[in-house]
Image (cartoon, rainbow, N blue to C red):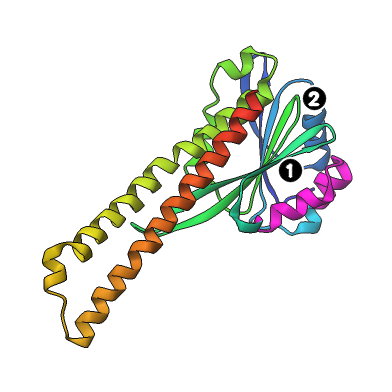
């Protein structure tokens, strides 16, 4: 058994999704080898790398480096897609809001082949998981079910960028108005304590702008990956 790993599976049987929890390695292997499309979601927040290697490398023959990537932060927080023998390995970024101008970078790693998709993540997906589980009908109506499902799942991630971008942009606009307006410039205080607060606000502006640039750059890269999948 691999009870330390939370695994959920959705298998399309007769065009209808059948959802269940998987605990045994042999059950996972059987689902992946099935001719009917299956999505397996693996939460590794409470497991170790050797446990996941037993499943993904020893039983499913995935490249060991991909398992390492599942446990390590992607360098420079960049989305990527790698072509492996018989499957693709994708790393996507998403963002959890942690305040009006603060957000946490998360990663979702994806194995995708002709008949299966396996998503692996180090943190709970929160609202993303039910959104991904709402599988559109067209996924079961075409032969490329796996690619169509990945397109659906990744689109849910990129949709989440809008609210984060809007929040950070609003903070940036408010900071610029409050610190750079002519009225505030004339009232710039010589009081060292008040002046420190004003300078702190001014320093937040480039940080907010940098965050916006990073979010937009990530979004463009991930939209490019989605388009390549379909193409």
Q: Quadrant of residue 211?
A: bottom left
Helix, strand or loop at mark 2: loop
* Pick the front one: 97 or 183: 183
Helix, strand or loop at mark 1: loop
Kindly identify the residue that appears in the image at 62 percent across and 46 percent down: 79
Q: Quadrant of residue 46?
A: bottom right
User: Is residue 163 in the magenta section?
Assistant: no
Mark nearer the N terminus (1 vs 2) = 1
Q: Tags 1 and 2 in contact by the CB under 8 Å rule?
A: no
Kindly identify the residue that appears in the image at 61 percent across and 50 percent down: 78
Image coordinates for residue 37, horizontal then vertical, percent: 71, 23
Residue 177 left/right relative to 52: left
Q: Is residue 45 visible?
A: yes
Kindly identify the residue that appears in the image at 21 percent across and 63 percent down: 180
Q: For mark 1, what is the residue?
A: 23
Disc sitting over residue 194 in the figure: none
- Image quarter hosting the C terminus: top right
Calculate the distance from the C-alpha at mark 1 to the C-alpha at mark 2.
17 Å
Q: Main secondary structure of the magenta part?
A: helix
- Mark nearer the viewer, 1 or 2: 2
Q: Which residues are magenta?
A: 53-74
């Amino acid at each position: 058994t691999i009870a330390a790993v939370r695994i959920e599976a959705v298998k399309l049987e007769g065009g209808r999704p059948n959802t269940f929890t998987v605990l045994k390695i042999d059950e996972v292997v059987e689902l992946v080898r099935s001719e009917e499309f299956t999505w397996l979601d693996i939460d590794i927040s409470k497991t170790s790398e050797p446990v996941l290697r037993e499943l993904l490398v020893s039983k499913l023959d995935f490249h060991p480096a991909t398992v390492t990537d599942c446990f390590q932060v992607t360098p420079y927080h960049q989305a990527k897609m790698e072509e492996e023998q018989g499957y693709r390995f994708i790393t996507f970024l998403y963002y959890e809001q942690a305040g009006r101008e603060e957000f946490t970078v998360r990663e979702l790693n994806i194995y995708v082949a002709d008949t299966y998709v396996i998503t692996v993540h180090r943190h709970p997906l929160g609202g993303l998981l039910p959104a991904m589980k709402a599988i559109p009908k067209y996924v079961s109506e075409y032969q490329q079910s796996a690619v169509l499902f990945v397109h659906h799942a990744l689109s849910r991630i990129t949709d989440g960028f809008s609210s984060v971008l809007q929040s950070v942009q609003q903070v940036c606009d408010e900071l610029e108005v409050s610190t750079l307006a002519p009225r505030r410039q004339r009232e710039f205080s010589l009081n060292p304590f008040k002046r420190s607060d004003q300078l702190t606000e001014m320093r937040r502006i480039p940080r907010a702008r940098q965050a916006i640039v990073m979010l937009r750059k990530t979004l463009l890269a991930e939209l490019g990956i989605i388009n390549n999948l379909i193409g």
